[in-house]
Image: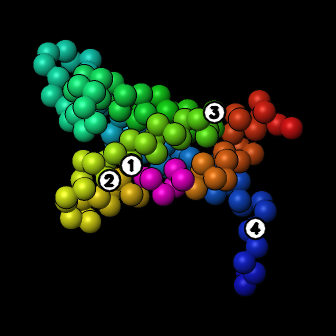
């Protein structure tokens, strides 16, 4: 218990928990609402933080927050799916909320950090990646 070595059996469970929690929360709390906005039709009013246009910005955000978050939960193409998720959170922190208080940046940072950890560590053995790409 006092060792700093990871508990080998629990390392992969921790990665699974990170994937399900932060992929699932992104999908359910953020992505599906934005997808509903797009599918509802009518005028699209969405932030355009990097100058691509409101509709394209919304579509790219939905891609990250729905498609990539869903793949993250499954552990499929994990590192590739994390790139759009990390980019979206970086834009949220450093563009959308740059002049806001730290508290307004906190949510995006709380998603960004686990995404970086998962990018570095990989999806773990409880993932489709492990099944498909096991060496």
Q: CA distance from mark 1 to mark 2?
A: 5 Å
Residue receiving disc 1: 90
Sequence-wise first label, 3 or 1? 3
Is label 3 or label 4 in front? 3
Q: Give the Cα separation between the discs numbered 2 and 4.
A: 33 Å
Q: Which residues are magenta?
A: 111-116
The answer to whether mark 3 and mark 2 are in CB contact below 8 A is: no
Mark 2 or mark 4, whichever is nearer to me: 2
State which tag comes first along the sequence, 4 or 1. 4
From the top left corner, tell me how far across and down residue 74 is, in percent.
60, 35
Is the Cβ of the residue at disc 4 closer than 8 Å to that at disc 1? no
Give the label on residue 77, or none. 3
Q: Is the C-beta separation of discs 2 and 4 under 8 Å?
A: no
Q: CA distance from mark 4 to mark 1?
A: 31 Å
Contact (Cβ within 8 Å) of mark 1 with mark 2: yes
**Residue 93 — which label?**
2
Q: Residue at x 26, y 17 (%)?
A: 39
Query: How far across and how far down the image is residue 116, in percent?
Result: 54, 53
Q: Tell me the CA gap for discs 3 and 1.
A: 20 Å
Mark drawn on residue 7: 4
Q: Residue furthest front?
A: 51
């Amino acid at each position: 218990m006092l060792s700093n070595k990871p508990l080998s059996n629990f390392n992969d469970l921790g990665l699974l928990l990170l994937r399900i929690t932060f992929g699932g929360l992104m999908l359910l709390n953020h992505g599906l609402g934005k997808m509903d906005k797009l599918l509802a039709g009518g005028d699209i009013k969405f932030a355009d933080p990097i100058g691509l246009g409101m509709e394209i910005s919304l579509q790219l955000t939905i891609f990250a927050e729905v498609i990539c978050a869903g793949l993250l939960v499954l552990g499929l193409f994990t590192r590739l799916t994390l790139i759009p998720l990390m980019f979206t959170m970086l834009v949220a922190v450093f563009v959308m909320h740059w002049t806001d208080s730290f508290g307004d940046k906190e949510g995006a940072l709380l998603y960004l950090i686990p995404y970086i950890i998962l990018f570095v560590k990989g999806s773990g053995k409880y993932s489709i990646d492990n099944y498909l790409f096991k060496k």
